[in-house]
Amino acid sequence: MMKHMSPPLADLNLPKGVHRFRRLPDEQLGALWDSIILEESLKAQLLSQAMLNFTLRGKVDRSVIPLHGVILLVGPAGTGKTSLARGLAHRTAKAFKGGAFRLLEVDPHSLTSSAMGKTQKAVSELFSQSIAESAASGPTIVLLDEVETLAADRSKMSLEANPVDIHRATDAVLVQLDALAESHPNLLFVATSNFPQAVDSAFTSRCDLVMQIPLPDREACALILKDCLTGLGKTFAAIGKLPASAQFERCAAECVGLDGRAIRKMVANALASSPQTAMNPEQVTIEDLLAGALAAKANRNHGGKGK
Ligand SMILES: Nc1ncnc2c1ncn2[C@@H]1O[C@H](COP(=O)(O)OP(=O)(O)OP(=O)(O)O)[C@@H](O)[C@H]1O
Ligand SMILES: [Mg+2]
């Protein structure tokens, strides 16, 4: 008889609201950190703030420096915030050798419920039990992706959903953050949002660092495009040579205004510019990429973002 396969240990008993648990450091996350093209000074600032969280808190009284252990990354969709947050967790853990760090990834959508009072209860339990337990047994980094879902701006509640409940969920997040800040100095929240106007100002005010992640400038666009083409070049050698072509810089310039995700997707669209190219991606030309970039930009402008 075949033995029944059990699920991987890490997936067992994940508390409600936590959709992934990882031990750190994790080199896969290190690759994410490296893959995001961002001014080195911003990356260094981010990493330093995260490191300071674990060197200072616990040793210096909160009446001197009231750190909450929260970093917020805000910026347009597709600019690498989630990737940076995961990568940051890895790099921070790596800086403290043998620190036994772990990363909890929270899925805020799984906590929200239309039933009265349920969201608030789920939020309170997640923070006061699951997260507190993890922090009690070792340094813990918590990814709060799309935090506007949990810490919604109470001053802008729409009446459509269940405003009282969302109001209470935001209150619960703030109460829990304050409590954890007092009791667990070896805890760091890294939150992301591409909709900062929707994040409650009391949450933002508790953040130790709010960093704006910008759209890539021309130089960054060229690096992202090159990285993408070089990566494809490992499988399709001819594509790896495109960054050396005369039109490459123009193509990169046409990407300005697109986010990093859109640039990589644009390359995929160029590979699908005809059934022949799709069947044999090595046939893609720099003209296909140029057309792809122009089309992606036109689409974006059409989408109401303006020029
Ligand atoms: N600055 C960048 N450099 C290189 N690649 C990037 C950059 N920004 C985004 N990307 C690419 O876009 C993909 C999406 O990134 P990610 O999911 O981290 O963005 P995000 O800001 O969290 O987006 P969202 O706001 O929609 O959640 C990444 O896998 C990465 O390949
Ligand atoms: Mg994201």
Image: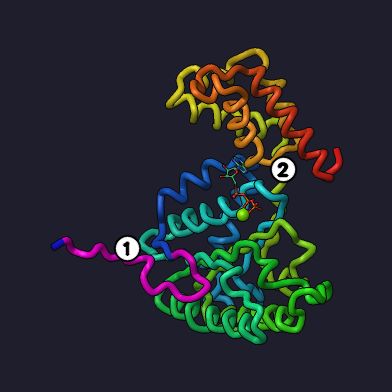
Dot 2 amino acid type: Leu
Looking at the image, residue 211 sits to the left or right of residue 35; the answer is right
Which residue is depicted at the point 75% across and 75% down?
Answer: 161
User: Where in the figure is residue 122, as x and y percent of width and height?
Assistant: 57, 81
Looking at the image, residue 275 sits to the left or right of residue 212; the answer is left
Which secondary structure class fits the magenta region best? loop
Q: Report helix, strand or loop for mark 1.
A: loop
User: Where, by quadrant of the figure, is residue 289 drawn?
Assistant: top right
Q: Which residues are magenta?
A: 2-20
- Nearer-N-terminus badge (2/1): 1
Neighbourhood count class around disc 2 (C-alpha, 10 Å): few under 14, some 14–19, many 20 upward: many
Query: So how many labels did they put on this image?
Result: 2
User: Where in the figure is residue 115, as x and y percent of width and height?
Assistant: 64, 83
User: Where in the figure is residue 111, as x and y percent of width and height?
Assistant: 58, 74
The image quadrant in which ligand 2 is located: bottom right
Q: Nearer the viewer, residue 252 or 267?
A: 267
Which residue is depicted at the point 72% across and 36% down?
Answer: 217
